[in-house]
Image (cartoon, rainbow, N blue to C red):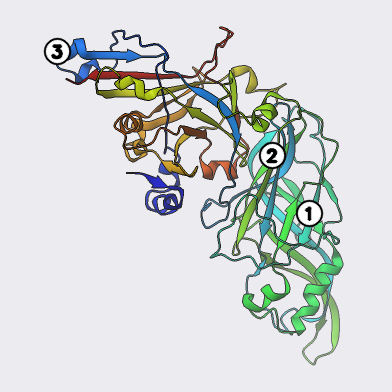
Amino acid sequence: MILKISEIKTLLRATGAKFFLIVVVAIFCLPLTSCDKASSVGLDVQPKNDLLNVGFQDTVSLLTRTVKEDSIRSDQGLITNGIVLLGKYNDPIFGEAKASIYSQVLLNSAIYPTTLGTNPTCDSIVLSLAYNGVYYGENSGRTPPKKQTINVYQVLQDISTVSSYYSDTTLTRETHNDLANGYSFVPDIDSVYAEGTAAHPLHRVAPQLRIPLQVNFGQTLLNNRLTGIMTSNSTFESFLKGLYITTENTTGLNKGEGRIISYYSNSTVSAIRLYYKYTGLNWNGQVDSVRHTSFDLSLTLGARFAHLETTAPAGSNLNTQLTSSTSTSNYATTYVQSLAGVKTKISTPYLMSLNDNGPIAINKAELVVKVDPATLNDNGNTYAPPSTLLVFGINDDKTSYVLPDFLSSPFYYDGTFNAITNEYRLNITRYIQQVLDKKLHNNGVYLLVPHITSVTSGTRVVIGGADNSSGNNLYQMKLNISYTKLH
């Protein structure tokens, strides 16, 4: 059974995100040399009188190159864990990466003309995002990490919870009016001091990014209590359609500098809090004091999606592969990146020659992907490899599909990173068999970061490609096949 990308959404909801991450793997192979050598792989399932018909191939010809990842769905309808990314870094190998957030802002409850007291005046208004303790890029050894500039713009288009949004989606926004006034902050995960009680005006609160917004924006919100648009979210959305939160305008990040930080958008901490004062009246309606209080607007209740951008360094090996027009090129090093960045295309041009001496049954086909450990920690910075890699098959029209091996148990497919051997092993036996049986076309596969992980993490990995023409590729990608000849 072949699952197209459009069918993955239904499968995801049925099986859950965790199972989805163990998903897919497709890969290809082909013997460059037809050298049959005995192997113990798969022998335990063969009758003893069939052992002479068992063969093993570890010289299957592969072509590998890095290609740009397609835009991927990034709205909370699919990304249900509430994780959002914000920040920018300059990866020494992969170049600049930027993660921004589009989000609705909704009322927690109806606000009527008299709800906020008499003559409410904005003292301050703060946008808070709750850290979840995970970051990518510049490590904590720098004191402090490089500052970034954050901008917050009002969105001029509707954002809907029933619409699908993608990593490259851009909505019209008021770029001439930055509500954050180019706020400069240090992307460091630590608890902060914030408002408290009259007796303790400041106290330490949970780690969060606190972005002061324009006071006149807060006053505009207060004034609109009189118009009736704050009595329901349907009317409030006509006034404030959403916000675009970004650090894309941060400049001056050298290689190895910058961070992308992970936040909980579904935390009660992630909200807009408006602090205001109002005139207090006594029992007979006369002014007796000025009182201070606040109310929150929610980021949790509304629609949101991630906007992601990656740019490979000019003149780099990565950029060379992305800009090459030669589809048959083969490279000794390829790349896989989250943030809707890049993936590796693997082709098996001579795979069908395995049937030259008659049909065979595949006992096991395992793609072995080796990682160069020197690229995992650049000068102490955190560029973590993806915990899991997936393989998607490629249709004739260039769309992707889930491999039949995905429908097996999680332990069958594997695809997880082994930090001891620095490699991924992906079982694509059923895919290879169906290609040999001509049930699937031999168009190759994509090796990539699972889509949910790609929009909720900043992971990336440098892997060995299939080319070893120099004889020095210590991390050469292999497709190991154990098979039985059929008579």
Query: Three-letter amino acid code at disc 3?
Result: Lys
> On the rendered image, what quadrant is the C terminus found in?
top left
Judging by the rendered image, the residue that carries numbered circle 3 is: 48
Sequence-wise first label, 2 or 1:
1
Lateral position of residue 465 relative to residue 383, left or right: left
Residue 262: horizontal and vertical position, in percent? 64, 44
User: Of circles 2 and 1, which is in front?
Assistant: 2
Is there any visible trace of residue 110 in the rendered image? no
Residue 93: horizontal and vertical position, in percent? 70, 26
Q: Residues within 10 Å of mark 2 (few under 14, many from 20)?
A: many
Image position of 458 with respect to 362: above or below: below
- Measured Cα–Cα span from mark 2 to mark 1: 25 Å
Q: Secondary structure at mark 2?
A: strand
Judging by the rendered image, the residue that carries numbered circle 2 is: 310
- Measured Cα–Cα span from mark 1 to mark 3: 71 Å
Query: Three-letter amino acid code at disc 2?
Result: Thr
Q: Residue furthest left?
A: 49
Is there any visible trace of residue 440 in the rendered image? yes
Lateral position of residue 385 relative to residue 13, left or right: right
Image position of 477 with respect to 76: above or below: above
Q: Secondary structure at mark 1?
A: strand
Query: Three-letter amino acid code at disc 1?
Result: Ile
Residue 357: horizontal and vertical position, in percent? 26, 17
Foreground of the two, 125 or 388:
388
At 61% from the left edge and 31% from the top edge, which residue is drawn?
460
Residue 312's image quarter? top right
Judging by the rendered image, the residue that carries numbered circle 1 is: 211
